[in-house]
Image (tube, rainbow, N blue to C red):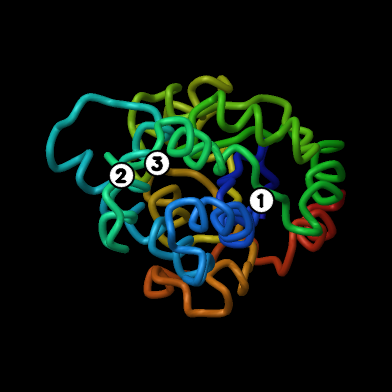
């Protein structure tokens, strides 16, 4: 394979462990709303499960673009209703801080070392549905060494819309085929490849707590397949 000129990274699930972080932080919040006996990991799954539906809803409804923080808050309120809690009865400060849990996620154990090694040879940027403030706060807390933090505001659309991938390549002043998306999600990689990007898969078998990934049916023979970001660095000669 011809090496890419830059690497663009999905973040949630690929670089950071959203499930463990959201479960850990949700435990205290659940206790505050009277659900302390419930499984916080199950709540994390319930919250995240709405994500794909929210993305599809944005596209289908023609709703004007809003940052992911707004959607995370809406998804939180829906998850609470599903668990029998009226969010209108909750303190606004609690809901706002709970929503910001997505700003405070921990990296996978290999992430910082892998990114640091890859950065020696390639520019590394985010290609995430997260908004810039969210990704910036996450990076500062977790020590993620991005060359540039590009949120969904760059294109004004959410992946897997082709414009999300193409806008990133355009902003970096390169052809789509010179940019490689690095992601743990086959559906994301499939959309990137259909938009002309290279594709590198990083396996994250514990993203869903060991449960099968919901997009496994999108699996293809990717340009690179790695077991970690440090393994990808090995494969790319970093």
The residue that label 2 is drawn on is 87
Q: Residue at x 52, y 57 (%)?
A: 31
- Residue 129 x, y percent position in the rendering: 45, 38
How dense is the environment of label 1, judged by Cα within 10 Å: few (below 14), some, or many (20 and up)?
many
**Sequence-first tag of 3 and 2:** 3
Q: CA distance from mark 3 to mark 2?
A: 14 Å
**Sequence-first tag of 1 and 3:** 1
Looking at the rendered image, the disc whose residue lies closer to the viewer, 1 or 2, is 2
Foreground of the two, 212 or 125: 212
**Relative to 113, does residue 187 appear above or below in the rendering?**
below
**Relative to 90, does residue 24 appear above or below in the rendering?**
below
Q: CA distance from mark 1 to mark 3?
A: 19 Å
Q: Residue at x 47, y 39 (%)?
A: 99
Foreground of the two, 69 or 160: 69
In the image, which disc is placed on residue 72? Answer: 3
Looking at the rendered image, the disc whose residue lies closer to the viewer, 1 or 3, is 3
The residue that label 1 is drawn on is 15
Residue furthest to the bottom in view is: 211
How dense is the environment of label 3, judged by Cα within 10 Å: few (below 14), some, or many (20 and up)?
many
Name the secondary structure under disc 3.
helix
- Residue 125 x, y percent position in the rendering: 64, 33
């Amino acid at each position: 394979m011809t090496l890419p000129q830059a690497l663009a990274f999905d973040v949630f699930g690929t670089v950071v462990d959203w499930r463990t972080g959201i479960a850990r932080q949700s435990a205290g919040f659940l206790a505050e709303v009277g659900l302390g006996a419930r499984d916080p990991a199950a709540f994390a799954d319930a919250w995240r499960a709405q994500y794909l539906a929210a993305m599809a809803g944005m596209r289908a409804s023609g709703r004007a673009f809003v940052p992911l923080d707004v959607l995370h808050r809406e998804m939180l309120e829906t998850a609470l209703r599903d668990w029998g809690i009226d969010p209108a009865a909750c303190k606004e400060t609690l809901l706002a801080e709970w929503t910001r849990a997505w700003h405070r996620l921990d990296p996978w154990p290999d992430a910082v070392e892998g990114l640091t090694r890859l950065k020696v040879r390639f520019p590394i940027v985010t290609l995430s549905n997260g908004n810039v403030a969210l990704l910036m706060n996450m990076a500062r807390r977790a020590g993620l060494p991005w060359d540039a933090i590009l949120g969904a505001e760059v294109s004004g659309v959410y992946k897997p819309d082709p414009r999300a991938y193409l806008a990133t390549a355009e902003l970096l002043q390169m052809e789509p085929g010179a940019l490689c998306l690095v992601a743990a999600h086959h559906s994301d990689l499939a959309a990137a490849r259909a938009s002309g990007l290279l594709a590198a898969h990083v396996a994250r078998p514990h993203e869903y707590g060991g449960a099968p990934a919901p997009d496994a049916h999108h699996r293809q023979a990717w340009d690179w397949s790695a077991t970690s970001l440090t393994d990808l660095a090995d494969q790319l000669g970093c």
